[in-house]
Image (spheres, rainbow, N blue to C red):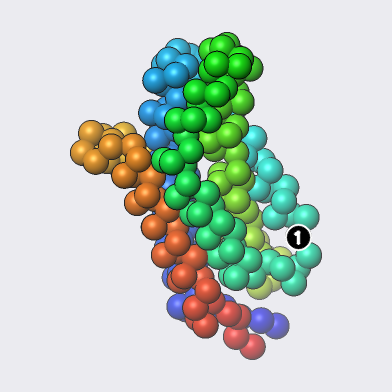
Amino acid sequence: MTSVSRVLLLSIYFCAFVVGGVLMGFEMLGSRYLFPYFGGSIGTWASLISTVLCALAIGYFGASALDDRLRTPRTIALAILIAAAYLAFVPLLADPVMSGILESLGDGPTATLLASTALLLVPLSLLGTFSPIAVAILTRTAAEAGRVSGLVYGVSTIGNVVGTLFTTFTLIPTIGSRSITYVFAIVLACCAGILFLPAGKRTF
């Protein structure tokens, strides 16, 4: 039976918190990218929230479809790293993409949904794979499954709350949307680096 090193255990829970924070922080940041083009109506928020939920569903289903041999720290590290790279390009590409959507589709529901999808779907789907794979890595017996999944999703949800509040009330008023996006990309890259380390392995 495999066991999990203490370093790997702490690394995964730490990254669960950070990834959860970035995930919801970027949703809040998404509103700043969309509002200049599509306004801050309830329709825009509905598009953002729906896109986030769809992205998480895609991430969960994608993680569940992976072969057991691919449910490793390196797999989630790779997903996080790709999400970080996507975020790094958002400040450069957001304005032309949003402008193009506005010019071609206007500012109705189709446009706001497409804009939200372009902004959020790929990186948040990748981040959505984290928790299911983390649970698979940390679960050694069937009896542990409930406790482990509760801890992973609980830590991630606390990260969601912190990311939402910290981004909204501290980061956005202080450093601006584009700088925050780069910060999120760097933070995610650091998490990926932690999980790529040799400590990110099971011991026997």
**Residue lying at 56% horizontally and 56% vertically, measured from the top left:** 82
Q: Nearer the viewer, residue 201 or 78?
A: 78
**Quadrant of image for the N terminus:** bottom right
Q: Position of residue 195 (x, y in %)?
A: 51, 71
Q: Residue furthest bottom?
A: 204
**Residue lying at 60% horizontally and 80% vertically, measured from the top left:** 202
Q: Position of residue 21 (x, y in %)?
A: 41, 48
Q: Nearer the viewer, residue 175 or 60?
A: 175
Q: Residue furthest left?
A: 174
Callout 1: 10 Å neighbours few (<14), some, many (20+)? few
Q: Nearer the viewer, residue 35 or 129?
A: 35
| Dot 1: element | loop
Amino acid bearing label 1: Leu
Q: Is residue 68 above or below residue 179?
A: below
Viewed as shown, does residue 118 lie left or right of 31?
right
**Residue lying at 63% horizontally and 66% vertically, measured from the top left:** 75
Q: Is residue 37 above or below residue 48?
A: above
Q: Which residue is mark 1?
A: 66
Q: Is residue 153 visible?
A: no
Q: Is residue 8 above or below residue 45?
A: below
Q: Position of residue 86 (x, y in %)?
A: 52, 49
**Residue lying at 60% horizontally and 51% vertically, measured from the top left:** 126
Q: Position of residue 15 (x, y in %)?
A: 46, 61
Viewed as shown, does residue 151 lie left or right of 91?
right
**Quadrant of image for the C terminus:** bottom right
Q: How many marks?
A: 1
